[in-house]
Amino acid sequence: MDEFTEYIAGLDGPPKDAVEHVRTRALELVPDAEEGMSYGMAALRYRGSPLVSARATTKHIGLYPFSPAAIDALAPDLAGFSTSKGTVRFTPDRPLPDDVLDRLVLFRRDEIDAMRSR
């Protein structure tokens, strides 16, 4: 079942486009990622671990890299965006720059690879 694709299909307009962009970009960077569920959210999973998810709310898009370390590592690049331990919030009219999104996804991929190679 393609949970993330189904979740996106239920969205409309700019939020749909923003969440689809996250999914598409992550799959370009990590083609081995698979759709699934993590922490109750439709997400991309890599090597059995959650890689990234994005959820639309009424006020923003929540990006979940499932890694507080990734958010900490990119904190300077996330200035101006609302963040918490596990979330980066952006809006369709002020999206996360692609290079920052890419680095979050790749940081998480590398983190998963490091965990799996122990």
Image: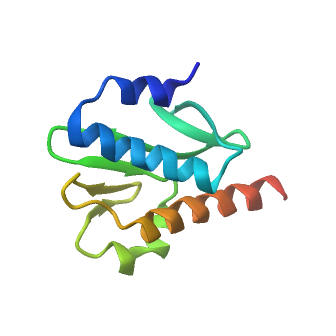
Quadrant (top left, top right, bottom left, bottom right) of the N terminus: top right
Image vertical order of residue 104 relative to residue 39, above or below: below
Quadrant (top left, top right, bottom left, bottom right) of the C terminus: bottom right
Q: How is the image coloured?
A: rainbow
Residue at 75 percent of width and 57 percent of height = 113
Which quarter of the figure has residue 76? bottom left
Foreground pick, 39 / 31:
31
Where residue 90 appears, as percent x and y from the top left, is 26, 56
Residue at 21 percent of width and 61 percent of height = 94
Image vertical order of residue 85 relative to residue 54, above or below: below
Residue 99 horizontal side relative to residue 48, left or right: left
Where residue 27 appears, as percent x and y from the top left, is 59, 47
Image vertical order of residue 89 relative to residue 58, above or below: below
Give the residue furthest to the top. Answer: 1
Residue at 71 percent of width and 44 percent of height = 32
Q: Can the viewer see residue 66 in this picture?
A: no
Where residue 45 appears, as percent x and y from the top left, is 62, 40
Give the residue furthest to the right. Answer: 118
Residue 58 horizontal side relative to residue 49, left or right: left
Give the residue furthest to the bottom. Answer: 76
Foreground pick, 88 / 4:
4
Foreground pick, 58 / 21:
21
Which quarter of the figure has residue 34? top right
Which quarter of the figure has residue 105? bottom right
Q: Can the viewer see residue 116 in this picture?
A: yes
Where residue 26 appears, as percent x and y from the top left, is 54, 51
What number of labels is visible? 0
